[in-house]
Amino acid sequence: MRLLGTTRSPYVRKVRVFAAETGFIDRIKLELHSVHLADFSPAVTAFNPLGRVPTLIADDGRVFKDSLVIGVYLATEAGRDDLWPADPDAQLKVMNTHAIATGLIDILILRLVELGKPAVRVWPEVLGATASKIHAVLDYFEANIGDLEAEGRTLGTLSVAVALDYLDFRFHDIDWRGPRKQLTQWHKAISAWPALRDQPFLDQAPAMAGKIR
Ligand SMILES: N[C@@H](CCC(=O)N[C@@H](CS)C(=O)NCC(=O)O)C(=O)O
């Protein structure tokens, strides 16, 4: 299988973690493609009209175009009902957790894009609103820590871990742990899990660190 992506994208890292968790990591070749909202990549667009990574080209030629879709594909192929439950209620729970985790990643990317603009074009309201939203999500996780613990390791909770790791990777100015003792402890515990531990974020282009995904 071919995975179009980068080692610094949080969405691609979700897929790398899902692939490690389902045992597919050694059968997937990561092909590096630098993409950005303000750029157009014909090489990625040839497989995914959105021009986004991650894009997975499966061995049978099917192309999967979103981190959750790829995660569901890998979990299904591996028969991992614990990662993506077949039971509709349990699946809805995982989808909800996943939606909040990926929503947090979306907000973080939006902030990163804003911070990467020339100062004169930065919209201060976006920086203010994204900061408030980021802290609201973190407070939500802290208040509902029992739900994360009860869910165990799923496509949802692994995505929460990736979102928190992305804060550590790119947002040193945001003290996300602060008084959130339970979330800090939960993150510390899940970070030791091999699939997360062995698939870290990496900046292949240090000169562009913080500027591009
Ligand atoms: N919902 C998608 C989001 C993927 C995404 O936005 N990826 C970014 C890289 S971090 C991208 O390809 N950006 C380029 C663009 O939007 O043009 C997923 O979960 O896979």
Image (cartoon, helix red, strand yellow):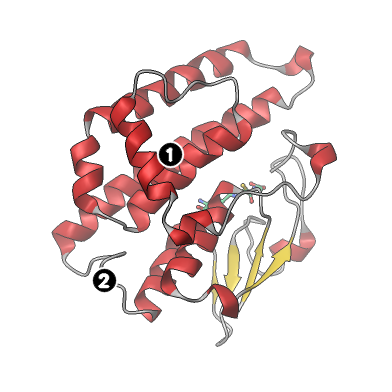
Q: Residues within 10 Å of mark 2 (few under 14, many from 20)?
A: some
Q: Amino acid at mark 1?
A: Gly
**Mark drawn on residue 69:** none
Q: Quadrant of residue 122?
A: top right
Residue drawn at x 66%, y 48% as measured from the top left: 8
Residue that badge 2 annotates: 81
Q: Is the residue marked 1 within 8 Å of ligand 1, measured from its CB?
A: no
State the image coordinates of residue 97 (x, y, percent, origin top left): 30, 46
State the image coordinates of residue 60 (x, y, percent, origin top left): 55, 88
Residue drawn at x 48%, y 46% as measured from the top left: 162
Is 145 located above or below residue 115 in the figure? below
Closer to the camera, 135 or 198? 198
Is 163 located above or below residue 30 in the figure? above
Q: Secondary structure at mark 1?
A: helix
Farthest right residue? Answer: 207
Q: Secondary structure at mark 2?
A: loop
Closer to the camera, 206 or 55? 206
Residue drawn at x 74%, y 40% as measured from the top left: 38
Q: CA distance from mark 2 to mark 1?
A: 24 Å
What is the count of numbered marks?
A: 2
Residue that badge 1 annotates: 103
Q: Amino acid at mark 2?
A: Asp
State the image coordinates of residue 83 (x, y, percent, origin top left): 31, 64
Residue 67 visible in the snapshot? no
